[in-house]
Image (cartoon, rainbow, N blue to C red):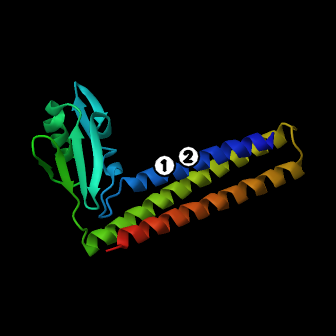
Amino acid sequence: MTTEVINGAEDKLKKSLDALKKEYGTLRAGRAAPSLLDKVMVDYYGTQTPVNQIANVTVPEPRMIMIKPYEKKSLKDIERAIQKSDLGLTPNSDGVAIRLTIPQPTQERRKELVKVVGKKAEETKVAMRNIRRDGNEAIKKLEKDKKITEDDRKDAQDQMQKLLDKYIKLVDSTKAAKEKEVMEV
């Protein structure tokens, strides 16, 4: 019974870590990546659609993203959506494709990004601690309902703590890697 609770908690912890990695992918660290455009939505026939679903997004150079719409008439809509986004990038259109040049971030901007990276990591850790708390409450309820013994509860709570520690370490290593990437010149 406790294994079900622990396995459920581990699934949630994995999802939290994956969400953090995806969030880090959308941070602009001076290197071009198609994932920068994941949050940019384009009005496509009245529906908000991600850019990568209506255009081919490639990275021909380390500091450039190339966007080739599948339909030529959606070029202006994509351009408008990028300008409205919080990316702070200016699209250059040649009538066929859009080029986004990623500028080298200033030292000040890098420090801001490191703070954002740390904040996102801390938010993920808080979410993970909440998952542990919920798991521990479920385990205590099993003991209260006389489905497990006190020893089983203690063992399960120890397993839950070890699981959390493992994922907190993964968050820290992911954070360190992203900070290193952000501070690279």
Image quarter where the C terminus lies is bottom left
Q: Is residue 53 left or right of residue 171?
A: left
Residue 128: image tag:
none
Q: Residues within 10 Å of mark 1 (few under 14, many from 20)?
A: few
* Res. 97 image quadrant: top left
Is residue 86 at least partly visible in the picture? no
In the image as oriented, which residue stretches furthest toward the top? 45
171 shown above or below 26: below
Q: Residue at x 31, y 70 (%)?
A: 110
Residue 153 drawn at (x, y percent): 83, 49
What amino acid is at disc 2? Lys
Identify the residue shown where x is 20% and y is 41%. 81
What number is the disc on residue 19?
1
Taking 56 as reference, is 173 left or right? right
Residue at horizontal 20%, vertical 53%?
A: 100
Nearer-the-camera pick, 53 or 77: 53
Q: Which structural element holds mark 1? A: helix
Residue 118 shows up from this direction: yes
Name the image quarter holding the N terminus: top right
How far from the left and from the top, in percent, is residue 37?
A: 30, 47
Percent x, y of residue 171 = 54, 61
**Under tag 2, what secondary structure?**
helix
**Height in image: 106 above or below 4?**
below
Name the residue: 44% across, 58% down. Answer: 120
Q: Residue type at mark 1: give it.
A: Ala
Q: Residues within 10 Å of mark 2 (few under 14, many from 20)?
A: few
Residue located beneath label 2 in the image: 15
Marks 2 and 1 close (CB-CB < 8 Å) = yes
